[in-house]
Image (spheres, grey):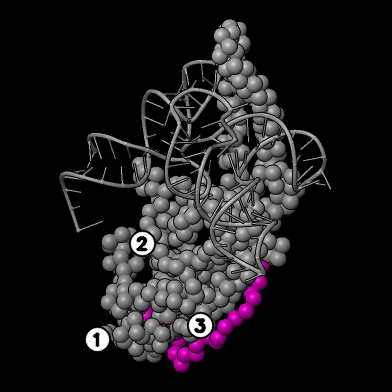
Amino acid sequence: MLDLSFVRDHVDVIRKMTEDRGVSIDLDAFQSFDGERRRLITEADELKARRNRASEDIGRRKKAGEDISGLAAEMKQTSQRIKQLDERIAELDERLRQFLLTVPNLPHTSVPVGHDARDNIEIRRWGNPPTFDFTPRPHWEVAEKAGILDLARATRIAGSRFALYCGLGARLERALANFFLDVHTREHGYTEFLPPFIVSTDSLTAVGQLPKFAEDMFHLEGTDWWMTPTAEVELTNLHRDETLDADQLPLRVCAWTSCFRSEAGAAGKDTRGIVRQHQFQKVEMYKFTLPDQSYAELESLVRDAEDLLQRLGLHHRVVELCTGDMGFASAKTYDIEVWLPSTGGFMEISSCSNCESFQARRAGIRYRPKSGGRSDYLHTLNGSGLAVGRTWVAIVENYQQADGSIVIPEVLRPYMGVARIPVPVGK
RNA sequence: GGAGAGGUGUCUGAGCGGUUGAAAGAGCCCGCCUCGAAAGCGGGUAACCUGCCAAAAGCGGGUUCGUGGGUUCGAAUCCCACCCUCUCCGCCA
């Protein structure tokens, strides 16, 4: 959420920004009901000021034994008028709030203007694609042959777009999550949390998922609960409506969770394999920072995610998203994309964003400056570190062998207990 | 699910119809003291909306004591509903 007075004073900036992002916002309607609201507030405030003075007067005169019935009757009328005005103002407040909740964040000035993913800018690449003396197969073929994934039975259990990991496949998923958490908590300075996987409407609104993206989530019928779409929700709400001391910052936290997405509108996209699922695991990194630190922290956030891919020996690149491709709450986003041999291209495996004060304002997260000045909204950042299921895919594809087995990267072997996932006899 | 207790500022915690935005501590900031620090002393320290202002600063007005309603000239204080926390009982991985 952007600051109301900022929006009011910079309507032209907002108009340009929403065009760059490719969204439409009714700014004329905003100006109209914002103006009405301010006029009514002025009128109501004047009446309240008069009532306050009269009430004090009544108190004094009553003590002195004077008759106050005339003034009291007059103030009763005034109170009724105030109530009418307040009701209308409350309606306009709600409209204003709904409006502000639909205005996306202002992109940082460094963000390239563009329409879609084609206008994103590649920042750097690491490593090289692996070479094969055979034609590499897609992960679902490798995995089914190795007996570590059973999509047919997953469908029997829950339907399409769910996965059933089996044997060493299940262990690989678990190994990756543990490896990620261990590196972040022991080497990158993050504190680990294990939060609820179900979250409230309020928590989702604070992050910016609601009201706009209700269709993308699973709502528990008849309740105020939703299956979490990302641990970003829980981690943001860790400090909702709190004022933190500046010397606590930056605060770096992380969490492993399952994530649930309805994938409404994704019909026909990535239907083969397990790249796009209703349920997947992810380790999320999150930071609460001072405003002047947030861009430096964004760079280190990306490095923390890349570090994992490098230790796993996976070829990848970092991409800076353009205005048209960025998320609603983000001021600047880098995506990390990992190489997939079967497609001969890159697949998104992490998204790292600086939301500046956008989420903090919605969620009421402030900091108190060291100098003792007035408190202000801090900056929040989030990034995947990493999407576990997609890393699983990348390992299966990049480390597949001619005989169908899968070599386990060195760093995962302590977690796996084996150096290779073999193909079962007879397959 | 049943019974009780409670939700107040950065924190602890008073107030229980009328100069209470809110006592008192703690914390934090500034100053004095000190070679320096601690202690001590003095002062300061909420958020939001709105008006004046190009803006900032500042000043004026308003709102805010879990949330939403109600009573009243006037509510942190009284009434109702809801939410949350704690204790006890029941149930349960």
Alpha-carbon distance for marks 1 and 2?
A: 28 Å
Q: Which mark is residue A310?
A: 3
Mark positioned earlier in the residue sequence (1 or 2):
2
Q: Which residues are magenta?
A: A113-142
| Image marks 1 and 2: residues in contact by CB distance under 8 Å | no
For disc 2, the marked residue is A160
Mark 2: few/some/many CA within 10 Å (<14, 14-19, 20+): some
Secondary structure at badge 1 equals loop
Mark positioned earlier in the residue sequence (3 or 1):
3
Q: Position of residue A236 (x, y in %)?
A: 49, 57
Q: Position of residue A25 (x, y in %)?
A: 65, 45
| Above-or-below relation of B38 to A308 | above
Secondary structure at badge 2 equals loop
Q: Quick one: quadrant of the C terminus of chain A? A: bottom left
Q: Do we see residue A105 in this rendering?
A: no
Alpha-carbon distance for marks 2 and 3?
A: 32 Å
Q: Does the magenta segment cover residue A128? A: yes
Q: Residue at x 54, y 79 (%)?
A: A316
Say which chain tag 1 marks.
A
The residue type indicated by label 1 comes to: Gly
Tell me: A290 left or right of A309.
right
Say which chain tag 2 marks.
A
Say which chain tag 3 marks.
A
Q: Residue at x 46, y 93 (%)?
A: A133
Q: Which mark is residue A426?
A: 1
| Above-or-below relation of A213 to A393 | above
Q: Position of residue A115 (x, y in %)?
A: 66, 61
Residue sitting nearer the eye, A34 or A363: A363
Q: Are marks 2 and 3 on the same chain?
A: yes
The residue type indicated by label 3 comes to: Gln
Mark positioned earlier in the residue sequence (2 or 3):
2
Q: Residue at x 58, y 50 (%)?
A: A361
